[in-house]
Image (spheres, helix red, strand yellow):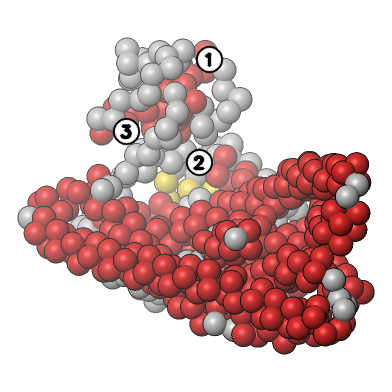
C-alpha cells in the first residue's frame, strides 16, 4: 500500500491556477480594468534564470535523489537473496546480515531524503522569496493609473495567491518529477537485468494500471478548480463588504439581504463542489486499491507459470512484485503531473506579464528639481484619463511662492486631478506645469515628490507606531523635527513620538497626523 499513499499525496498536493474571479464587484467597477493579457509562449530561459542562483543546492538535491533511488533497489534485491539462498541454506547468520543491510539501507535512505528535503525547501522557498520581492517591488513602481484602473483585489490576488499557487511547482512538483524519473530508470534497468520476460509482462500491465487514473485525476482537477473559483469569489465579496467604506455603503443602502443571498448562493455552490470532490476522491482511492492488487496479481500469474515451467525462482517473482510498485507508482504520478505543470506555467505567464508591465518612468539622469521659492504654474493644461475621460481642459493658473491657494469646485470638476498632475502621478497631454520655472516632466521623479507634501482626502495610516507613521515621508527626520512638525500642525498635545501605541483612527486625528507627515 506504499504506492497508494504516495499517489494520493501527489494528487492532493495539486495546486490550482487561480483564475481572475469572474465576480461583478459592486463598488470597484467604475473604470475599465486594464488587465494584462496572457498570450506569450512560456519563456523557459526566464524560468530557468529563477533557478540559476541556487545551482549548488540543486546539484545536492539531484545527487540525493539518485542515491535514494539506488538505495531503494536494495531491499527487493536482498529479499530475493533471502528467499532463494539464505533461508533455504539454513544459515541464520546470512539472514541476519541481509536483514541488517536492509535496515541500514532504509535508515540511510531516510537520512539522505531528509537532507534532500531540506535542500529542496531551501531552493524552492528562496525562489519564492525572490519572486515575491521582485513582484512587490515592481508593483510599487507601477504608475498610479495602473492601480486606479485595476481592481485592488486582483492586484493583491496576483501578488499573493498567484505566487503561492506556483509554490507547489517550484518546491514540490519539479523534485517529484525528478524523483519519479530516477526511480523509474533505476527500476527498469534492474528488472531487465533480472528477467526480460517478467519485465515485458510488467510493462504490458502498465497501461491497464495507470490508464484509469488519468480521467479521474482530470475530473478531480476540474472540480478543484471550480472550488477554487468559488473561494476566490467569496474572498472578493469579503474584501469589499468588510472594508470600512464597503460596510458603510452596505448598511446605508440596507443591502444586508442582498449580500446574504449572494453569499448564501456562493456558499452552497462551494459546499456542493466540496462534496463532489470528496466523492471523486473516494472513487479514486478505490480504484487505486484495486490496481495495487491487480498489477501484482498479473505478475504472480505469469511468474508462477514461469516458476513451474521455466525454472525461475520464487524469490525472483517476489522481487518483481515488490519492484512493480517502484514502477507503477511513479508512472501514475507522472501521468497526473502534466496538469499541474500546465496550470503552474499559466500562472508563471501571468506573473511575468505583470513583471513586464511598464514601470513609472524615472530617468536617473534627469536633473533634480530645485525648488527655492516654490512658484507653481499651470499653463494651458489639458488632461484626459487613460480611459478617455477628459478631466480638465485648458487650465492656467499661478500660485505665488508662499501663497495659500485653494481649488474650489463641484464634485468631478477636476480638483484632485490637478493635484495629481503636479507630482506627476499622471502626465498632462497638453500645456506645461512648472515649479520655479522647471517643467515637472523634465525633473527626476523622486526629487519632484521629495519637494511636495501631500495630504490626501482619504488619510491612510500604516499599521505601525505613531512615530514610524510620522517619519514615513522622511525616515531620517529627528525626534526634534517630528515634535516641531507636530507643533506646526497643532497636534503636539496628542503627539508623543515615543509612543508605541497605534494611532487613533478618528478622521480628524488621522488628518492631523497626515499633515505632520507631509510637513
Ligand atoms: N482614475 C480615473 N480614471 C478616469 N476618470 C477619472 C479618474 N479619476 C477621476 N476621473 C474623472 O475625472 C473627472 C475629475 O475628477 P476629480 O477626481 O479630479 O474631481 P474632483 O474635483 O476632485 O471631485 P471631488 O470633489 O468629488 O473630489 C471626473 O469626471 C472623474 O469622474
Ligand atoms: Mg477630489
The image quarter in which residue 115 lies? top right
State the SS at label 2: loop
| Residue 241 sits above or below residue 11 on the image | above
| Residue 146 sits above or below residue 317 on the image | above
Residue 74: % across, % down: 85, 56
State the SS at label 1: helix
Q: Earlier in the sequence, mark 3 or mark 2?
A: 2
Tag on residue 452? 2
How far apart marks 2 and 1 lie (CA) works out to 21 Å
The residue under the point 89% across, 73% down is 194
Say which residue label 3 marks.
511
Q: Are marks 3 and 2 in contact (CB under 8 Å)?
A: no
Q: Is residue 449 visible?
A: yes
The image quarter in which residue 489 lies? top left
The residue under the point 61% across, 80% down is 209
Local crowd size for mark 1, using a 10 Å CA cut-off: few (<14), some (14–19), many (≥20): some
Amino acid at each position: 500500500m506504499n504506492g497508494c499513499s504516495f499517489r494520493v499525496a501527489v494528487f492532493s498536493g495539486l495546486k490550482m491556477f487561480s483564475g481572475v474571479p469572474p465576480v461583478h464587484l459592486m463598488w470597484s467597477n467604475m473604470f475599465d480594468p486594464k488587465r494584462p493579457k496572457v498570450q506569450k509562449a512560456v519563456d523557459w530561459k526566464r524560468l530557468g534564470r529563477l533557478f540559476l542562483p541556487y545551482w549548488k543546492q540543486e546539484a545536492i538535491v539531484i545527487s540525493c535523489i539518485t542515491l535514494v533511488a539506488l538505495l531503494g533497489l536494495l531491499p527487493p534485491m536482498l529479499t530475493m537473496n533471502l528467499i532463494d539462498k539464505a533461508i533455504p541454506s539454513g544459515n541464520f547468520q546470512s539472514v541476519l546480515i541481509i536483514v541488517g543491510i536492509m535496515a541500514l539501507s532504509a535508515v540511510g535512505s531516510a537520512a539522505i531524503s531528509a537532507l534532500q528535503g531540506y535542500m529542496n525547501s531551501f531552493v524552492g522557498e528562496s525562489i519564492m522569496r525572490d519572486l515575491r520581492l521582485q513582484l512587490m517591488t515592481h508593483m510599487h513602481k507601477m504608475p498610479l493609473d495602473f492601480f486606479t484602473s485595476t481592481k485592488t483585489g486582483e492586484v493583491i490576488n496576483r501578488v499573493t495567491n498567484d505566487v503561492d499557487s506556483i509554490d507547489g511547482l517550484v518546491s514540490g512538483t519539479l523534485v517529484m518529477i525528478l524523483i519519479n524519473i530516477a526511480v523509474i530508470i533505476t527500476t527498469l534497468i534492474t528488472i531487465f537485468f533480472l528477467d526480460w520476460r517478467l519485465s515485458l509482462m510488467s510493462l504490458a500491465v502498465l497501461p491497464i494500471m495507470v490508464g484509469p487514473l488519468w480521467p479521474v485525476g482530470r475530473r478531480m482537477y476540474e472540480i478543484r478548480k471550480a472550488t477554487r473559483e468559488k473561494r476566490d469569489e467569496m474572498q472578493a465579496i469579503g474584501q469589499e463588504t468588510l472594508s470600512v467604506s464597503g460596510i458603510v455603503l452596505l448598511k446605508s443602502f440596507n443591502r444586508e439581504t442582498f449580500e446574504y443571498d449572494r453569499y448564501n448562493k456562493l456558499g452552497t455552490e462551494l459546499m456542493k463542489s466540496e462534496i463532489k470532490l470528496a466523492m471523486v476522491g473516494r472513487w479514486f482511492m478505490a480504484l487505486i486499491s484495486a490496481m495495487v492488487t491487480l498489477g501484482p496479481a498479473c505478475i504472480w500469474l505469469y511468474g508462477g507459470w514461469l516458476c513451474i515451467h521455466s525454472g525461475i525462482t520464487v524469490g525472483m517473482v517476489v522481487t518483481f512484485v515488490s519492484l512493480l510498485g517502484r514502477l507503477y507508482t511513479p508512472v501514475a504520478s507522472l501521468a497526473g503531473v502534466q496538469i499541474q505543470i500546465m496550470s503552474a506555467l499559466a500562472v508563471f505567464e501571468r506573473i511575468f506579464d505583470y513583471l513586464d508591465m511598464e514601470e513609472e518612468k524615472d530617468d536617473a539622469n534627469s536633473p533634480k528639481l530645485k525648488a527655492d521659492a516654490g512658484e507653481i504654474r499651470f499653463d494651458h493644461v489639458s488632461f484626459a484619463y487613460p480611459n478617455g475621460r477628459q478631466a480638465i481642459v485648458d487650465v492656467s493658473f499661478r500660485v505665488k511662492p508662499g501663497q495659500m491657494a485653494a481649488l474650489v469646485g463641484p464634485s468631478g470638476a477636476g480638483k484632485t486631478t490637478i493635484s495629481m498632475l503636479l507630482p506627476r502621478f499622471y502626465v498632462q497631454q497638453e500645456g506645461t506645469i512648472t515649479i520655479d520655472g522647471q517643467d515637472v516632466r523634465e525633473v527626476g521623479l523622486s526629487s519632484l515628490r521629495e519637494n511636495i507634501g501631500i495630504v490626501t482626502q482619504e488619510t491612510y495610516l500604516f499599521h505601525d507606531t505613531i512615530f514610524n507613521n510620522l517619519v514615513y515621508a522622511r525616515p531620517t527626520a529627528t525626534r526634534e523635527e517630528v515634535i516641531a512638525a507636530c507643533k506646526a500642525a497643532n497636534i503636539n498635545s496628542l503627539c508623543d513620538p515615543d509612543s508605541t501605541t497605534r494611532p487613533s483612527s478618528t478622521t480628524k486625528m488621522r488628518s492631523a497626523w497626515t499633515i505632520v507627515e507631509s510637513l
